[in-house]
Amino acid sequence: MSLLFGQASPAPAPPGLLRAMEEALRSHPGEVASVSELPGLSLGVLAAEAAEAAPTVSVDGRARLWLVGEIFDAGPLGTSDLRGRRSPELRGRLLEALRDGREDVLRALDGEFQLAFWSADAQRLWLVNDRFASLPLYWAAPDAARFAFAGGVRGVLMAPGVGTDPDVEALREAVSFGGFRLGDRTQVASVRMIGGGRVVRVDAGAPSFRRYWSWGDIPARAAQPRVAAIEEARALWTRAIERRLAGAERPGQTLSGGLDSRAILAEAAPRAPSWTAITYGVPGCDDARYAQQAARLAGADWRFHELYGGRDPDWLERRSRFVQATDGLIDLTDLGHLETLPLQAELLDVHLSGYIGDAVAGPSFSEVTDAAGILSRLPYYGGVLGLAPAAALARAEQLLAALDGAPARFALFEHKLPQSTNRWSAAWRPWFRVRRPFTDSAFFDFFQGQDNRVRGPGALYAHFLRSVYPAFFAHIPNQKTGLPVLASPARVFLERGRRGLWRRAQPYLAALGLPARPRVRSYTDDEGVWRRPASRERITATILRPGSVAADVFGLDRVAAVLDAWFERAAAPTQVIGTLYVGEHYRAGLLAHLRDARARAARRIP
């Protein structure tokens, strides 16, 4: 997958700016760049293939369009060829539609993409993000006549006049809300993220922002019999998978013990000549056991990657290598998703990802109806370093008000999910294609247009999975409960009781010398592994380093007390520790990363 970078300004860009941006953004040695230096615009694309990086140019040469990512359905502009998602024909139609001012065509696009459209006549740049902000895009305006943008914060920071001072309010939000910065914040005060469903229009270097699509545009669905709803959901799901499999030669996925990735496996694996399923976690965890059962049933090649494997703390070194490449915006826990990147790059050319499936089709956010509900699901931590409850609630109320009447749950799609899933999956994209069938527009709108009760626990999504793919869901348990989907509340209650008794019995059985391996529910063991002496020393030294931003904002003694409390198994959520570590690691290496990128770019300029 490719990414955009550049600067719009009436004044010429400094020599070598695009090369410097390119070097700052490059994460795969095989990526190629195409750069365009035009009056009023300097724009580059970094891509896996040269054909993806080149712009589409109008017949008269006065307009250009760059498309990064993929469009799976272009509505009235599309073609019947599923391989045409990036075809010259499609790009040409988009260019002409935007040249005619037809912003309405953007609403019909289904995909994971960004567009850049340039009109030389109007000296105007349009930047367009898909409705889910699947591919992150950042910007800064160092003055009234310059607008810098890039698919990574580090690219924007190469533009002259863009400062690197930390965003301390973003840090306060991150330690308050599950490691997430709300709205458009990044680690850097001068650089902001462009949200989903947006058009940024840049005239003479000055930007204006508007939405071409909003959460309130999803039409409400009329009630229908469950059988009919399941059949419609099945048709939409089948089409979403089919579109995202087109052209794949080595397709696969990461497979957990939950429902969403298994739904992809059940539909996609029989359609592909081969299928690879990669599960990661601690040995013996529920995710590994249930995923292996499902992969065996599908005839997939199942691979297991052990998290935290090797010497201690080389897992920390592996994750830390991605901090600059992800702009310090993924906390230490979620950086674990990148541990399997080398294995995925070796085995896959297309990855079908299902990490937000339960939020889209299931009950994850069905109970969120007000600001308090938003706060609980961010989640809000409070604590010594976090915002006070009243301030946190006021922030949630702002998020709710910004939805303009759309249901409260969409605040989580707007502010949480782009960070909790998009950013680390974006880090995979230079190495292979990532496609997410749960964000298929028609499938998404079908489920999100339903009444909350239809999306609730044990409702439509569960019945859809159980009836359409009984072999995969009638007997193989769901990681969340340890029981198959649609198990009765009584069975779930009894299973919880059984697990509780088994945990309490462990010490007694061990004292008697009896084998008693406990059930390993979670695929991670951050609390155990991070507390090992070598890991603790590295994490603490990084967070409390000389010049620590966290220590400056919160006070050295308070931060040290939070660390001591966590490492001694007292208060403070793990995500707070992971956020503090990544933030300080990022700040410590940022200037060197930018300096090295400039030096590499300088060596390339004749």
Image (spheres, rainbow, N blue to C red):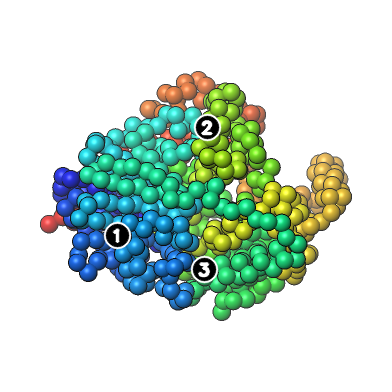
Quadrant in the rendering for residue 591: top left
Q: CA distance from mark 2 to mark 1?
A: 36 Å
Name which of mark 3 and mark 1 comes first in the sequence.
1
Residue type, mark 1 in image = Arg
Of residue 266 and residue 217, the one placed in the foreground of this image is 217
The quadrant of the image that shows the C terminus is: bottom left
Give percent across and percent down for residue 183. 47, 38
* Mark positioned earlier in the residue sequence (2 or 1): 1
Q: Which residue is mark 1?
A: 99
Q: Is residue 233 above or below residue 318?
A: below
Could you say whether the residue bearing mark 1 is in a helix, strand or loop?
helix
Q: Position of residue 28 (x, y in %)?
A: 36, 59
Q: Which mark is residue 398?
A: 2
Name the spot of residue 370 as percent of width and height, x first: 63, 36
Q: Is residue 218 visible?
A: yes
Residue 66 shows in this picture? no
Q: Mark 3 highlights which residue?
A: 244
Q: Residue at x 43, y 70 (%)?
A: 78
Q: CA distance from mark 3 to mark 1?
A: 29 Å
Seen at 16% across and 45% down, the residue is: 11
